[in-house]
Amino acid sequence: TLALRCLTPLCVGSGELEKSPRSDPGPWEVLHRHRRSWVWNQFFVLEEYTGNEPLYVGKLHSDVDKGDGKVKYVLSGDGATSIFTIDENTGDIHATKRLDREVQAYYTLQAQAVDRLTNLPVEPRSEFVVKVQDINDNEPKFADGPYLAGVPEMSPLGTMVVQVAATDADDPTYGNSARVVYSIIHGQPYFSVEPKTGVIRTALPNMDRETRDQYVLVIQAKDMVGQMGGLSGTTSVTVTLTDVNDNPPRFSHKNYQFTVLESLPTRSLVAKIKAVDADIGSNAEMDYRIMDSDGSGVFNVSTDEDTQDGVITLLKPLDFETKSSFSLRIEATNRNIDTNFLSLGPFSDTTSVKVTVQDVDEPPVFSAPLTKMVVSEDARVGTSIGRVSAHDPDTSSNAIRYSIDRNTDLERFFNIDALSGVISTAKPLDREVNSVHNLTILAIETQDPVQIGKGITLVTVLDINDNAPVFATDYETLLCETTTPGQVIQTVSAVDKDEPPSGHRFYFTLAPSVAGNPNFTLRDNKDNTASVLTKRGGFLRREQPVYLLPVLITDSGSPALSSTSTLPVRVCDCDSDGVALSCGAVAYTATGLSTGALLAILSCIITLLVMVLLIVTMRRRRKQPLILEEERDIRENIVRYDDEGGGEEDTEAFDMVTLRNLNVIRDPNVRRDFIWERLKDADVDPTAPPYDSLQTYAFEGSGSVAESLSSLESLSTDSDQNYDYLNNWGPRFQKLADLYGNGDGAAVFS
């Protein structure tokens, strides 16, 4: 029986090393043997062992081992050879490295005894566990520290602030290494901490934020239940006292005095006042209100939300001549009052404000700051359209002159009478260009020209019917060749720059010049649109690709205006769904191909052309020069080969001079038409010799050396024919000589 025996006091536990299940019994396995010696399958090894020698773990021993060295012990599994070693002779197991329980708490190993010679197992494989025993080598740590916490000021004694927590990496199930207690090192007497839970609480009542708003605590966590020799860790806790509304607002002055000009515009700032509140945030927010005033509705007070100032603004214009001073009583009240602190006093305060009005020389004032006038766009130049009026508000009542701010009338459409303020037209008006003119009228004191009052005059130009209707857009009408009669091919609408009071009403008809055309008709839909319909079918692009259809459009103005707009109709080749594929004139280029496909085809064509040019160039380089000396040129015969005859016996000689004379009269009897055409072909052939000659190599017939090559007169067998002469014809006929020059070759064609 294979047994692991622990000989150190660190080994704890008992039980058999369970035999691993095996499907087939080994040669050393006894199937009916159940007796087992006292064995260990779990024991402990102390972590962080610092000895110089390997730490002894235990001993592996088999009952089969008789001490004669025939049994060898093998160790495998988690950490085998790297951490744990075994003496294969004695079975002694040692740990060779320091172990850290916090890195790995236990190791699972397998032990086996094998025959040293055959390496076959003499015992089944057994498994055991080595657990690492913990020591107190880790101090407590605050994973979430340092902490930030807050507690309301003036909180009762014992109010919870925050709970801190420290963790210890040591084994919590073994001893007190991981049992932590808490204590406060710095932060007394204001705060305390519960030793077991780490809950921090206030230790003093009524702590005032306005006196001190932040405290920094140092909390310690110590293991070993705080006993001597335990390890400790610390963290800081920053406690901020949060504000509560325990302070009322207070004005720094009980009386305020301000001076403003009577010319101050409404909604302008008069002054700012401030009530001071020691609280912050929402607890310092306040509302201001006017409790009493001798000028009702003249002033208003509001809160500046950023600074909590009281902002006094002017609601009505000031007039020194009417009232020169105002008295106000203003109250500031906390917006958010905490009922727990009502005993500290009223959370509001009041102050007095006196506003003095200062006299100024005021500019002229228009009786109406905005004047509206209307004028027809066909009004004649010089037509009066209205009058403006201004006065001097001061007691001096100076005379006033009027003028137009030309920055608001750059094209000078209007004039104003300097004394009376009457406005009249100075140029023809066009409502379609500018329907409203916004004029700034200046009123200037004659005694003090720097005093200028301004008024606004809006001149609205009334519309007349002076624009004819036109198509609403540039229509593009497509007509399929397969269109049937009575089909709507386009719906058109119109626009008119004019704006009649009752709205537009347009009438559509075909122009008189095409009213009776056989191709199209027009139907007025009575809703300011019209439909164009076909009167026939069978439209063809090649006959007429585009039709121009003039449409007469008339408006409902008085007097009515009309115009003629031309609608182009393009005839298209369409698919079965009526989608246009190609329109307009019929082209000879391929249609329906994408740009990429066309580019691909073009690339192929260019490639083929380049290849042809290369082949032609190579052939011309390989050719031998054909130009011979004039006296050696023997090719002055033209051979006629349009029928088979006697070979060279049928050749007819012709004078080359006749061929070189391009204007020679052609003789039909001698078939010079054929020769003439061949001569022209040779002239334009880039591979032909550079002189006028017509050559043929098809010498055949009964009088030819090769005789007739025609199959018409071939015998059923040519076994009697001798083709040895083919060997003398050169390399071009070598293939024929090989096929016909011997019996084997001839037999192939017999």
Image: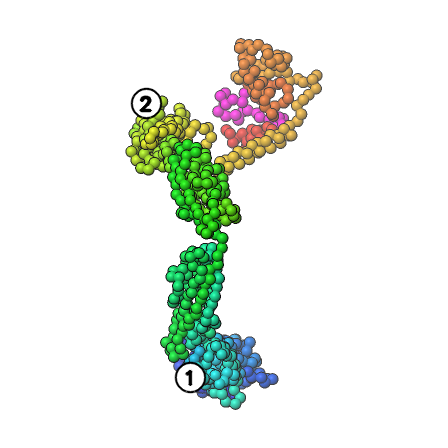
Q: Which of 440 and 640 is in front in this view?
A: 440
- Residue for badge 1: 157
> Residue sitting at 49 percent across and 55 percent down?
360
**Is residue 379 in view?**
yes
Residue 591 is marked as none
User: Dot 1, how many residues are within 10 Å of its Cα: few (below 14), some (14-19), or many (20+)?
Assistant: some
Q: In this view, does 468 lie to the left or right of 89?
A: left
Under mark 2, the amino acid is: Gly
Overall secondary structure of the magenta section: loop
Q: Is residue 645 above or below residue 738?
A: above
Residue 281, percent from left and from top: 45, 70
**In the rendered image of this protein, does residue 461 appear above or below residue 311?**
above
Q: Which mark is residue 516?
A: 2
Q: Is residue 719 magenta?
A: yes
Residue at far front of view: 396
Magenta segment boundaries in residue numbering: 708-730
